[in-house]
Image (cartoon, helix red, strand yellow):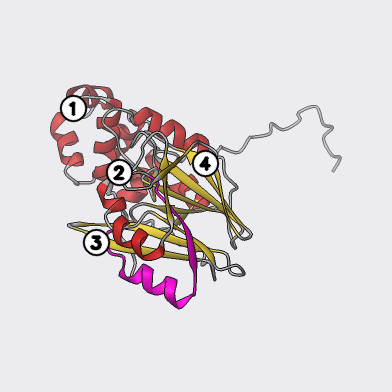
Amino acid sequence: MPLIPLEDTFADVINKAQRGYGISDEELSTRAAIPLSALTALKSGKADVADLRRVARHLQLDPDALEKLALNSVYPRAPHIPRGFAMFNTRDEAMTVNNYLVWDAKSREAAIIDTGTEPGDLLDLIAAEHLRVKFILLTHTHSDHIAALAPIATSTGASVWASEREPVDYPGARTFSENAYFHLGNLAIKALSTWGHSPGLTTFYVQGLSYPLALCGDSLFSCSIGGSPTHFREQVKNTRARIFSLPKDSLIGPGHGPLTSLAFERINNPFFARPAAKPKIVAEDTDKPTPKS
């Protein structure tokens, strides 16, 4: 699979945060002490680092992480999972969307997380690996994430599951509650509520593969986050509480953009990175006796 571009540019991040926190251009310009014309330039993608750093602080963004994003100097390099995991990236008009397949290597039991827009490659891999798909698990029900639900469900015969806060309109679909578990042989999948972008947005935390894996839909992107015009603060809060509390070696499978890792996002995601702690300066003990020459 070719490299998948980051979902959001630095300008997207600024616009998303400003819209989510409900701050007008005039207010943000005043707070950051930059001309309105400079803010307009930033939001259109013209990176002035000094202005960018001033604006970041008033949008609860980490200035260093936002600057790296603006300079195109970051891209995640997640470790490879040798078996039991596959990522698919399908086109949805001008953008792309991700979906995933996880399976237990011994029992060949599998689960699909979201469907993307094209079922072909997914169904081919299921056949090639002789998998028995038990569950189709939906992170949320936005159209790009469930576009291929009907042909995939028909082909696999798997049960379809969505959050009780966001049921899917599909015959026979079932709902799960927060912290529900799904089992595939030795794999365990836990449903974590990371709502905000949508009412029932769920992160599926998979244990039993080479690395812990969080398949999070639009809860988190590499170097960004899913937006919401009405519940953005909740999205940030729930993502921080449920995803950033996972083991530090966890991999992150977002709904858009490249596969990433929790360790990478802790440093490079403007919404969640925090400045490195400054080393403590230990004062010299002036009471020590002066060595004799």
- The structure residue drawn at horizontal position 20% and vertical position 40%, both measured from the top left corner, is 42
Which mark is nearer the camera, 1 or 3? 3
**Kind of residue sitting beneath label 3:** Arg
Q: In this view, does 103 lie to the left or right of 145?
A: right
Q: In this view, does 16 lie above or below 96?
A: above
Tag 3 residue: 91
Residue 85 on the magenta segment: no
Residue hosting label 2: 169
Q: Give the range drawn in magenta.
A: 117-139
Amino acid bearing label 4: Phe
N-term mark: 2 or 1: 1
Label 2, label 4: how many angstroms apart (C-alpha)? 31 Å
Q: What residue type is labelled 2?
A: Asp
Q: Which mark is residue 244?
A: 4
Q: Could you tell me which quadrant the N terminus lies in?
A: bottom left
Q: Residue visible at 34% across and 61% down?
A: 154
First in sequence, mark 2 or 4: give its number. Answer: 2
What is the C-alpha distance between the residues marked 1 and 3?
Answer: 33 Å
Badge 3: how crowded within 10 Å, few (<14), some, or many (20+)? few
Q: Mark 1 points at which residue?
A: 25
